[in-house]
């Protein structure tokens, strides 16, 4: 596409992503600047980011290999915060199956209901199986809208796949994604290409391909997220209504955000990626009130 917009999924300190105009042969600079333009200011900012990255890594129990219930709890907490921050942005992209602008809201409501089943932090010493069972149960009860029902079905797939397991490793994650995709597809009367279902299947296939060679969780999770990102970008050309609006599937974006948050929990770093839109969707006013932009982050 020669013109359009890049939707940034880059995590930032302020929690704001940036959508920037794309012109033929040139990309405009990010509107977010260094807080201090001096060399000393930039060095201080980079040093601060490195310290924050080390602290984040220290919080992960077993980076890269496998995770337990506590780490899964952190994933849900991070995913819920990130989805809620990008809720309006996801709503703006919602044009299928009905352009009612509530996909982001429905995902947040459903995931919040799922997280509520985990109990207080003091109850966090749960196995992977117990965490996913609680999440699936809570999501089923609190599911809102099509996207919420699909998320609940996906979590049920994870719960059934990891039943009896204390931790989750790479092959286990791949199997769980596969079962989640199968359950979601089976629950729909007419699953369509170019939706969250396509993105979920792509994630499962990417995870399975890597898990056949590597047992560690981090590379398998990264492969799943990368495959999901590629599939999400393809959704614009797979569904006529998305092509007409020039956007990607809203539910698929929500799923990618959750997968990227999972990657952050198991590796210590969230992927830095952008999604290309062929045209700018309806604008959302920023929290600062200065102008409008499809950013929330």
Image (tube, helix red, strand yellow):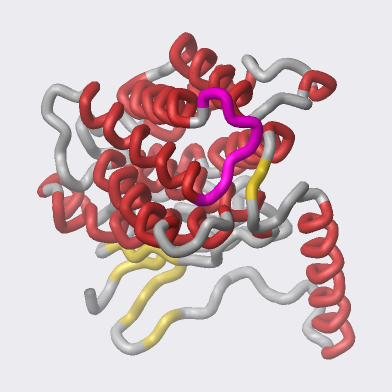
Q: Is residue 164 magenta?
A: yes
The dominant secondary structure in magenta is loop
Nearer-the-camera pick, 111 or 86: 111
Look at the picture and state if 158 lies above or below 229: above
Quadrant of the snapshot with the N terminus: bottom left
Q: Quadrant of residue 146?
A: top left
**Residue 292 appears in view:** no
Q: Position of residue 191 (x, y in %)?
A: 16, 33
Residue drawn 59% across the image and 43% down it: 82
Look at the picture and state if 273 lies above or below 133: below
**Residue 187 appears in view:** yes
Look at the picture and state if 119 lies above or below 169: above
> Hey, which residue is sitting farthest top in the picture?
141
Q: Position of residue 10 (x, y in %)?
A: 56, 62
Residue drawn 60% across the image and 35% down it: 80
Q: Position of residue 208 (x, y in %)?
A: 37, 53
Look at the picture and state if 135 lies above or below 59: above
Task: Tally the marks.
Answer: 0
Residue drawn 89% across the image and 86% down it: 40
Nearer-the-camera pick, 27 or 80: 80
Residue drawn 44% across the image and 34% down it: 104
Judge from the rendering whether residue 74 lies leftward or rightward of residue 39; answer left or right. Answer: left
Judge from the rendering whether residue 116 lies leftward or rightward of residue 83; answer left or right. Answer: right
Nearer-the-camera pick, 239 or 216: 216
Q: Which residues are magenta?
A: 163-170
Q: Position of residue 115 (x, y in %)?
A: 62, 23
Judge from the rendering whether residue 190 lies leftward or rightward of residue 247; answer left or right. Answer: left
């Amino acid at each position: 596409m020669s013109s359009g917009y890049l939707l940034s999924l880059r995590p930032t300190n302020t929690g704001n992503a940036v959508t920037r105009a794309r012109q033929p042969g040139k990309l405009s600079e990010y509107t977010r600047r260094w807080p201090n333009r001096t060399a000393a200011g930039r060095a201080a900012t980079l040093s601060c980011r490195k310290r924050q990255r080390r602290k984040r890594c220290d919080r992960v129990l077993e980076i890269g290999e496998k995770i337990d219930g506590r780490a899964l709890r952190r994933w849900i907490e991070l995913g819920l915060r990130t989805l809620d921050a990008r809720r309006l942005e996801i709503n703006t992209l919602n044009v299928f199956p009905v352009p009612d602008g509530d996909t982001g809201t429905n995902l947040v409501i459903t995931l919040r209901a799922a997280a509520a089943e985990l109990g207080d932090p003091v109850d966090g010493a749960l196995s992977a199986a117990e965490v996913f069972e609680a999440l699936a149960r809570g999501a089923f009860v609190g599911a809102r809208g099509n996207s919420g029902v699909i998320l609940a079905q996906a979590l049920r797939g994870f719960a059934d796949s990891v039943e009896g397991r204390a931790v989750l490793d790479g092959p286990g994650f791949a199997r769980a994604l596969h079962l989640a995709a199968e359950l979601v597809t089976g629950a729909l009367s007419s699953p369509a290409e170019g939706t969250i279902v396509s993105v979920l299947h792509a994630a499962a296939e990417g995870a399975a391909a890597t898990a056949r060679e590597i047992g560690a969780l981090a590379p398998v999770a990264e492969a799943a997220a990368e495959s999901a990102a590629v599939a999400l970008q393809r959704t614009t050309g797979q569904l006529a209504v998305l092509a007409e609006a020039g956007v990607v599937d809203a539910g698929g974006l929500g799923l990618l955000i959750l997968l990227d948050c999972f990657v952050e929990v198991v590796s210590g770093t969230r992927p830095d990626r952008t999604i290309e839109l062929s045209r700018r969707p309806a604008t959302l006013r920023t929290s600062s009130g200065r102008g409008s932009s499809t950013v929330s982050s």
